Amino acid sequence: MATLAPTAPDTDAVAGAPAVRLAGVRRVYGDVVAVAGIDLDIGAGEFFTMLGPSGSGKTTTLRVIAGFERPDAGHVELQGVDVTRVAPSQRAVNTVFQDYALFPHMTVAENVEYGLRIKGIGRRDRRARAEAMLDRVRLPGLGDRKPAQLSGGQRQRVALARAIVNGPPVLLLDEPLGALDLKLRQEMQIFLKALQRDLGITFVYVTHDQEEALTMSDRLAVFNEGRIEQVGTPAEVYEHPQTEFVAGFVGVSNVVERDGRRFTIRPEKIRMTDEGVGDAEPGTVREVVYVGMITRYVVDLDAGGQLVVVRQNLETSSQEALAEQGKRVRLSWRPEHTYEIGKEGK
């Protein structure tokens, strides 16, 4: 006998509840633990990012929220309502994918209208709402074109318009800018953040791009091997990484061990001089990498280990920077710019 798809719960959204709550969520594929029992609250109206390398569990977690994956343990709540066994089509979320997933045989307007048509909205009303949404995503007058006639950035905005025209309280975005070139990706980052502020809905965004996460997020969660290593604002995660993995994955960080203590320090916080003061560490410049706006130095320390140092090229030419290779230097930093981590990275 065929089983019926679960119906949406009768309970209304709970006032003041998180937009998304995951409690003990675990997902296993054979011997592979994709998500290892995570707990997470995402507030209403947040731009929240799940950041991590490939295979860290972030996309699986997003699919669990969307309902495309059923957790092996734990439960999922949307606005205080348990939706763990509710079908994807009946959850108050929409999803935007990296490959856009537009219908190639439909016009742009028909793509945007699709969800409204499924809901039984009348033709005139859904056309008006689709046109208004295309205006909002800066695509006025393009409703009669086919997706193949648009650029990658325009197709991504059509996918966004289709996802938000129904006014979902939560929008899930699975690496939506991954197929775009660098310049267009940076432009879309600014656009997406402004759109989220304007709409006031919750964005849950998946990416492996650290700069993207730091640029766009109100808060972010750093994933590693199916677990969440740290949750916080971009500034908290960048300036005060709680584990060695976070320190190394979110931006670039030096990990130094002195007197049995391990601490992190960011390359831009280190002062490199011929004669340092205070906590100055003597060393030799082993490598110099000129990167336009900045120069990156790798310094071998006399006390062991190495530090990466970054300097802005305010008045330094490439020839001057590269000439410092092999130079004896001293490195110093302020104590408040270091953050101690445990020996096991905890």
Image (cartoon, grey):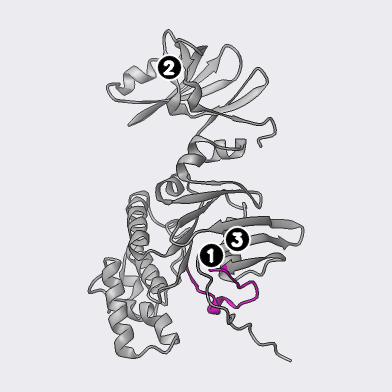
Residue situated in front as seen by the camera: 142 or 129: 129
Q: Earlier in the sequence, mark 1 or mark 3?
A: 1
Q: Residues within 10 Å of mark 1 (few under 14, many from 20)?
A: some
Q: Position of residue 72 (x, y in %)?
A: 72, 66
Give amino acid for label 1.
Ala
Q: CA distance from mark 1 to mark 3?
A: 20 Å
Q: CA distance from mark 3 to mark 2?
A: 43 Å
Q: Earlier in the sequence, mark 3 or mark 2?
A: 3
Can residue 94 be found in the magenta stretch?
yes
Q: Is residue 21 left or right of residue 173?
A: right
Stretch in magenta: 78-95
Q: Earlier in the sequence, mark 1 or mark 2?
A: 1
Residue placed under numbered mark 3 in the picture: 61
Tell me if residue 189 comes above or below residue 343 in the rendering. below
Q: Is residue 255 left or right of residue 315?
A: right
Name the element at disc 2. Answer: strand
Residue placed under numbered mark 2 in the picture: 272
Q: Is residue 257 left or right of residue 249?
A: right
Residue sitting at x 51%, y 41%: 237
Q: CA distance from mark 1 to mark 2?
A: 49 Å
Looking at the rendered structure, which numbered label has been put on residue 17? 1
- Seen as rendered, the residue at the extreme left is 141
Can residue 339 be found in the magenta stretch?
no
Give amino acid for label 2.
Met
Tell me if residue 311 comes above or below residue 103 in the rendering. above
